[in-house]
Amino acid sequence: ENITEVILPHGLEEIGQGAFDFCYGIKELFIPYGVKSMNISPEVSGIREMHVPPTVEEFGSVYVIIESFTAYSKLYIVKGSSAEKYAKSIRAYVEYIDYWVEQDGELVKYYGESDIFCVPDSITSFADGAFDGAEGITLHCLKDSVAVKYAEDNGISCVTYDEVNAGDTNGDGNINLSDVSDVMKYIADWGNVELNIPASDTNADGKLSLAD
């Protein structure tokens, strides 16, 4: 119970049965990209939320057992992934997420359903085919950044900004309730609401949501 956080290493491919048994202090688990199979038993651990990458294809007993916990367990998954199929089969509560793989500053692959992706400052290059399958996506990024050239070379729509002041969504130089209001109107699709998207993405998760 004294263990409250665990960081799983990149390169991991399998999480075996019993790996988190009796770890009641861990409530949320992030499975690293590259894991292909996992077998976690929620009834003998404290885990109630799991972030599952699209690489996982085999789940062992995790979804069978998690069925009795669907009232208060949540799986964060990518739409169209194997995790979605299993979650639906046992009616687990899910939240769809946009997911991208970044290695040493390179955006290797983007998975998601959003039509907007705010390119993080940490991205310095893009792998070939990084946005394959992301139909209709628009990149929002700084003017003269590597993302602009990548978008132009690959026929991807791109919106640029001269600068990004995190939180100043309307570009008036101040961060206040007006910015909050504009973001909420944008999320609610009120219509013609103009925002500096990267500045609005305050948690740098690549999209706009109530979390921002």
Image (spheres, grey):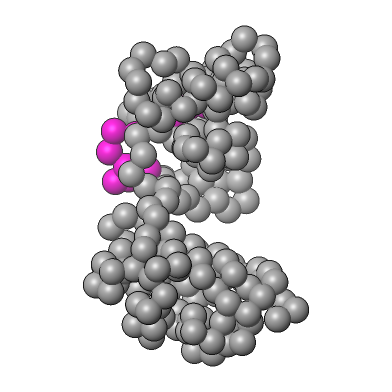
Judge by depth and name the residue closer to the eye, 3 or 100.
3
The x, y position of residue 112, in whole percent, is 37, 47
Q: Tell me the quarter of the image containing the N terminus.
A: bottom right
Q: Does residue 17 appear anywhere in the picture?
A: yes
The x, y position of residue 34, in whole percent, is 48, 68
> Residue 116 vs residue 30: left or right?
left
Q: Residue at x 38, y 53 (%)?
A: 96
Q: Does residue 149 appear anywhere in the picture?
A: no
Vertical order, 64 against 195 (above or below): below
Q: Residue furthest top?
A: 172
Q: Residue at x 28, y 74 (%)?
A: 90
| Magenta-colored stretch includes residue 61 | no
Q: Tell me the quarter of the image containing the C terminus.
A: top right
Judge by depth and name the residue closer to the eye, 21 or 31.
21
For the magenta stretch, what is the residue range?
131-142
| Magenta-colored stretch includes residue 138 | yes
Vertical order, 101 against 39 (above or below): above
Q: Residue furthest front?
A: 71
> Residue 68 vs residue 206: left or right?
left
Q: Residue at x 41, y 30 (%)?
A: 187
